[in-house]
Image (cartoon, rainbow, N blue to C red):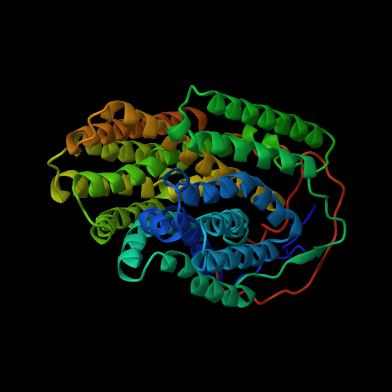
């Protein structure tokens, strides 16, 4: 028997307060919000700070690089150092970077602040899912928490576009960064009463430094190669060399992790997790779904502004139906996952999302309207995507020991982030090829339609992969480890139902 560093020392149930879920939803919302909120503000940022046209995209890319590269490390730190400690550190880094970015006086300062923001987000995102897994029992309590967690992430991305337009129009681009500061301060104030204190580990395993360096470098280089394809091209020496270097680094990471797992040294990612079919299928589904979903947000925003001539505020408001559909799909999944299971919901949600994106591909045109080109496809796609978050979170942590929930959460978040980067890079190329040299509204609409069609295909592939891969696989075997003892800094009174009495203990096989 071993205990997680955040569990009570006696093997009793973990405790949680009523503020735990609001804190975790704030995490997921903020992380997703800041991936999209700056997009509409980019022209104003460039004009005010004097960005060169070719460097403006680094306001987005710097966040994506740091976030994607550090997710696995952030998830494992939560397991080893404590979930509440990691949560507090992530909030502090994220909030401080937001403040510095909002006060930036040069392009370099803003890009650096965005990179540090991404590092803070990489600590926050995995710990949120890990805390839900540990502190909510399987069944209705966890389904509800996972549903709200998934919806908050999707809503953060959609609201980010809407809020970016409103804030840029009414207050100025700096408010897009500074708005995070009061939210972070409120969340930090709620952490102490809401999030259970971490225990102290008398014999904690050491961090897998080699694995951390390799996976951070490998994923960062991979994301860098992908985000530069729009300017460098897929066949350029820079792109081919960067992607080849990423493959070498990630291959070396896998070799180090296999060696560490065999020697029971506590690897950063125990590859044995992927022998569990629900965990594998959840990560494959997340990779494919996010490849289509992230790109769809991007191309919908471009279509509204470049073809339908919407201003920033009006374009942001056009995402409201998508937000409503996400909520509706999440409610459906929360109420039905216990009866129909994860596999059915993922397949149905993936196919419904694909139908929505396919509808977009047929409906967008040079003479499109909100009612004819946006409303219906948005509702269908968003309901389907909303249905997927509860079963995704459940499957990705199914059968995972309490002390490895951060590892599993970091893996799922990495799949999501890498999928978004890969999908956007590929679909931008597809759209550019379909647009051709014309560049008018009709040509742009043709390019966006082609991208939506590929996004639909990606969600069909996600549904088919889940139908094949997902099953009732046995819990992934865990190599034997020496017994570890813990002493508690603090325990708090159980303030709610839905706590799993046995989640603080795990039997290693």
Q: Where residue 145 sits in the image (x, y, percent)?
A: 49, 60
Does 33 sit left or right of 303 as displayed?
right
- Seen from the viewer's position, the closer of residues 192 and 480 is 192
Is residue 137 something one can see in this rendering?
Answer: no
Q: Where residue 198 sits in the image (x, y, percent)?
A: 73, 66
Residue 184: quarter of image:
bottom right
Is residue 48 something one can see in this rendering?
Answer: yes
In this view, 66 is above or below 200:
above
Which residue is drawn at the image coordinates 67% and 42% (left, top)? 216
Q: Where residue 218 sits in the image (x, y, percent)?
A: 65, 36
In this view, 23 is above or below 475:
below
Which residue is drawn at the image coordinates 32% and 40% (left, top)? 353
Q: Where residue 238 sits in the image (x, y, percent)?
A: 56, 28
Does 14 sit left or right of 35 as displayed?
right
In this view, 194 is above or below 391:
below
Does 265 sit left or right of 177 as displayed?
right
Does 225 sit left or right of 309 as displayed?
right
Which residue is drawn at the image coordinates 59% and 73% (left, top)? 188
- Seen from the viewer's position, the closer of residues 219 and 288 is 219
- Seen from the viewer's position, the closer of residues 389 and 164 is 164
The quadrant of the image that shows the C terminus is top right
Which residue is drawn at the image coordinates 73% and 30% (left, top)? 252
Residue 381: quarter of image:
top left
């Amino acid at each position: 028997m071993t205990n997680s560093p955040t569990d009570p020392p006696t093997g009793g149930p973990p405790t949680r307060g009523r503020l735990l879920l609001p804190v975790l939803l704030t995490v997921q919302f903020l992380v997703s919000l800041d991936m999209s909120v700056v997009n509409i503000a980019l022209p104003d940022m460039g004009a005010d700070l004097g960005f060169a046209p070719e460097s403006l995209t680094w306001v987005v890319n710097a966040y994506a690089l740091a976030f994607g590269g550090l997710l696995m490390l952030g998830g494992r730190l939560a397991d080893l150092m404590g979930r509440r400690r990691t949560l507090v550190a992530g909030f502090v880094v994220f909030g401080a970077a937001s403040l510095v970015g909002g006060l930036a006086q040069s392009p370099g300062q803003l890009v650096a602040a965005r990179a540090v923001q991404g590092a803070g987000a990489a600590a926050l995102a995995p710990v949120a899912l890990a805390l839900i897994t540990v502190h909510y029992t399987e069944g209705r309590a966890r389904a509800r928490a996972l549903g709200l967690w998934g919806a908050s992430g999707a809503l953060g991305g959609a609201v980010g576009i809407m809020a970016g337009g409103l804030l840029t129009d009414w207050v100025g681009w700096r408010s897009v960064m500074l708005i995070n500061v009061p939210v972070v301060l409120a969340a930090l104030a709620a952490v102490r009463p809401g999030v259970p204190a971490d225990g102290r580990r008398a014999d904690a395993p050491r961090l897998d430094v080699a694995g951390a360096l390799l996976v951070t470098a490998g994923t960062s280089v991979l994301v860098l190669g992908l985000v530069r394809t729009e300017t460098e091209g897929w066949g350029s020496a820079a792109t081919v060399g960067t992607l080849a270097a990423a493959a070498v680094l990630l291959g070396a990471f896998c070799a180090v992790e296999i060696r560490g797992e065999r020697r029971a040294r506590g690897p950063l990612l125990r590859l044995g997790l992927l022998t569990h079919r629900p965990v594998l299928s959840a990560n494959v589904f997340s990779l494919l779904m996010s490849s289509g979903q992230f790109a769809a947000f991007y191309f919908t925003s471009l279509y509204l502004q470049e073809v339908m001539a919407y201003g920033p505020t009006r374009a942001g408001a056009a995402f409201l139906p998508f937000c409503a559909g996400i909520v509706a799909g999440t409610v459906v999944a929360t109420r039905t996952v216990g009866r129909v299971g994860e596999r059915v919901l993922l397949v149905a949600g993936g196919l419904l999302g694909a139908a929505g994106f396919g509808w977009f591909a047929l409906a967008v045109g040079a003479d499109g309207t909100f009612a004819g080109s946006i409303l219906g496809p948005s509702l269908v796609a968003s309901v389907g995507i909303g249905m997927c978050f509860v079963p995704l979170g459940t499957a990705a942590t199914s059968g995972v020991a309490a002390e490895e929930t951060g590892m599993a959460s970091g893996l799922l978040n990495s799949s999501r982030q890498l999928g978004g980067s890969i999908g956007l890079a590929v679909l931008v190329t597809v759209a550019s090829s379909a647009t051709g040299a014309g560049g008018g509204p009709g040509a742009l609409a043709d390019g966006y339609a082609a991208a939506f069609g590929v996004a639909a295909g990606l969600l069909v592939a996600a549904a088919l992969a889940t139908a094949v891969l997902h099953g009732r696989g046995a819990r992934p075997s865990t190599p034997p480890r020496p017994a570890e003892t813990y002493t508690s800094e603090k325990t708090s009174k159980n303030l709610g139902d839905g706590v799993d009495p046995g989640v603080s203990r795990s039997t290693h096989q």
